[in-house]
Amino acid sequence: MLIEDAIVALQIHEVPGKAVEMRAYHKVDRSYWGLTNPVLDDQARLWRQDLPLDERLQLASELWDSNAHEARICATKLLIQARIRPDDHAAWTLIKTWLD
């Protein structure tokens, strides 16, 4: 999945005025799209079902790198599963890149 397509799939759910409120609340200099958590949950669930792990990891990485608030939340939700096995090196490597 292309990152551009993923962003479009998310941004079509924008709640007018919510991005301004989110920026004021979070006080972090990054993009805010004005999306609700249920939208992010639903979209991440669809992508987890539809994409193989390597594509989910790529999409999660690109969403995180966009530095948009909702994209970063969605990136982490792409990795939600019952268990990430210790031998899932690609997933653990990606998660470690998100840490300071």
Image: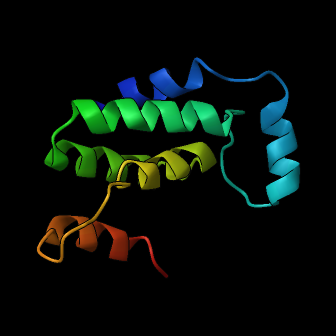
Identify the residue at the far front of this view: 82
Q: Is residue 10 above or below residue 41?
A: above
Identify the residue at the far top of this view: 12
Q: Residue shown at 30%/39% (left/top)? A: 48
The image's colour scheme reads: rainbow
- Image x and y of residue 53, in percent: 17, 48
Residue 84 in sight: yes
Q: Residue shown at 43%/70% (left/top)? A: 98
Picture quarter containing residue 59?
top left
Specify whether 70 is left or right of 90.
Answer: right
Q: Nearer the viewer, residue 12 or 49?
A: 49
Residue 1 in sight: no
Q: Nearer the viewer, residue 71 or 85?
A: 85
Specify whether 35 is left or right of 79.
Answer: right
- Image x and y of residue 5, in percent: 37, 23
Picture quarter containing residue 18?
top right
- Image x and y of residue 64, in percent: 44, 54
Count the marks: how many? 0
Name the quarter where the N terminus is drawn.
top left
Q: Is residue 62 above or below residue 1?
A: below
- Image x and y of residue 46, in percent: 36, 29
Q: Residue shown at 75%/23% (left/top)? A: 15
